[in-house]
Amino acid sequence: MYRPSKKISIVLVVLFFLPLGLDAQNPASIESGMGKGIRILAADSSLYTKIGVRTQNLVTTEAPSVSNADWKTTVLIRRFRLKFDGWAYNPKWVYKLELGLSNRDIGASGDFEQVKRGSKIILDAIIKMKAHKQVTIWFGQAKLPGNRERLISSQKLQLVDRSLLNSKFNIDRDIGIQIHSKFNLSRAVLKPIVSVATGEGRNLTVGNINGFHYVGKLECLPMGEFTAKGDYFGGDLAREESPKLALAAAFGHNAGATRQGEQLGKFLVDSTGALLSADLNTLFADMMFKYKGYSLMAEYVIKKASREIIDANNRSFNTGDGISVSMGYLLTSNVEFATRFTQINPDNDFAFTQTNEYTAGLSKYVKGHHLKVQGDISLIEQKGDPEPGIRIRLQMELAF
């Protein structure tokens, strides 16, 4: 079995974009800068791309409890990403390509056969067409319009990583069509989104299994737009001069879902290896508030299946409900203190364990979310455990 190395993947991508700058008669325009990536504009203005690279280097140490301080430490490259976005032909045709090259990004997640035993390097591969002043149509592979925490880039998180609510209940990347729109109502802004996707996740090579995944979302910004799209990055790094609020609700229906986490996790099978399926319905509600360095984000989710399934391996769908609330304050020195509480409740003991997680974090933003150091400590209470577990993390992020 052959898998292309990470170095080969990088070289192929560079070779793809290199010709933009090699026309001696009509050289391309190239700009770069910290946090701005490498920006290339073709000489005839028919193609524009921005190339970005980022890495997250993470140290984690954890113990079952204070009285059982059997500490285990892991050091890894949590994420290593290459990102290309821009437009082709004219600015009405926008594209985004993101590749994940760390083992943590491309490792097996239960769909080895369904991706033809290949590495799942492609995260996003999306083409966006500006169909109208207020309407943009997306086609390809991208994050579905679910909970806010999932849609915020992992580069731009307030704490070291996303919450347990996201890891158990989110709807993830998938292949399909999305329609994004935006309407101004006096000062308020409404953003409706609808999506139709395969329902099985990213990079699959098999045909659609059972039905499709339908999502509808409505976001309202009653106090107007956030500065620099601040409703989709953690912390109030823009230091909003006036209060800003985002409210959103989304509903997803996955017809004939077959994986534990809809787009993620193992496929559920019976004793003969045949796939088991059920319809999954997910309701998300979230909010984001920012003002003069203060930030507050809250999410609630409930996910239900049309029928309970326990497969031959004692697995089930990740159904149940959860809540997550995080808040922080950014000092003028660009040091931020943040806290988060998360609770997840499964519908049965085969999905996961009922858990409460309490997290406190400290971040130093050297160059916003492009260069930062973050640390956090968590107490993790799980049903049946006499004492909470402890986790300490330290992460450095570099993106350009």
Image (cartoon, rainbow, N blue to C red):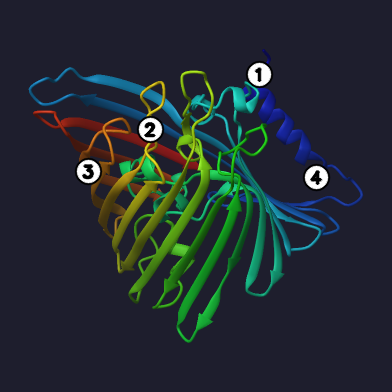
- Point out residue 234 in the picture as x, y percentages from the top left corner: 37, 54
Task: Please name the residue that numbered disc 2 is placed on.
Answer: 316
Identify the mark nearer the N-term, 4 or 3: 4
Of residues 207 and 397, the one drawn nearer to the viewer in this rendering: 207
Q: Residues within 10 Å of mark 2 (few under 14, many from 20)?
A: many
Residue that label 4 marks: 21
Three-letter amino acid code of the residue under disc 3: Thr
In the image, residue 315 above or below residue 52:
above
Question: Viewed as shown, does residue 388 lie left or right of 187?
Answer: left
- Between residues 149 and 32, which one lies in front from this camera angle? 149
Disc 2 marks a residue whose amino acid type is Ser
Q: Quadrant of the C terminus?
A: top right
Q: Residue at x 41, y 52 (%)?
A: 282
Q: The residue under label 4 is which amino acid type?
A: Gly
Type of amino acid under label 1: Arg
Q: Which residue is mark 1?
A: 3
Instruction: Report the disc number at residue 359.
Output: 3
Residues tagged 2 and 4 counted as in contact (Cβ below 8 A): no
Q: Is residue 343 left or right of residue 91?
A: left
Q: Secondary structure at mark 2?
A: loop
Cα gap from disc 1 to disc 3, whole angstroms: 38 Å
Query: Are discs 1 and 3 less than 8 Å apart at CB?
Result: no
Q: Where on the picture, by quarter, is residue 289?
A: bottom left
Q: Is residue 216 visible?
A: yes
Q: Residues under labels 4 and 1: Cα distance?
A: 30 Å
Q: Are marks 4 and 3 in contact (CB under 8 Å)?
A: no
Q: Measure the C-alpha gap from mark 4 to mark 3.
A: 47 Å
Q: Residue 232 location in percent, x, y?
A: 44, 58
Q: Viewer-nearest of labels 2 and 4?
A: 2
Q: Position of residue 104 (x, y in %)?
A: 47, 28
Whichever of labels 2 and 4 marks the residue nearer the N terminus, that label is 4
Q: Residues within 10 Å of mark 4 (few under 14, many from 20)?
A: some
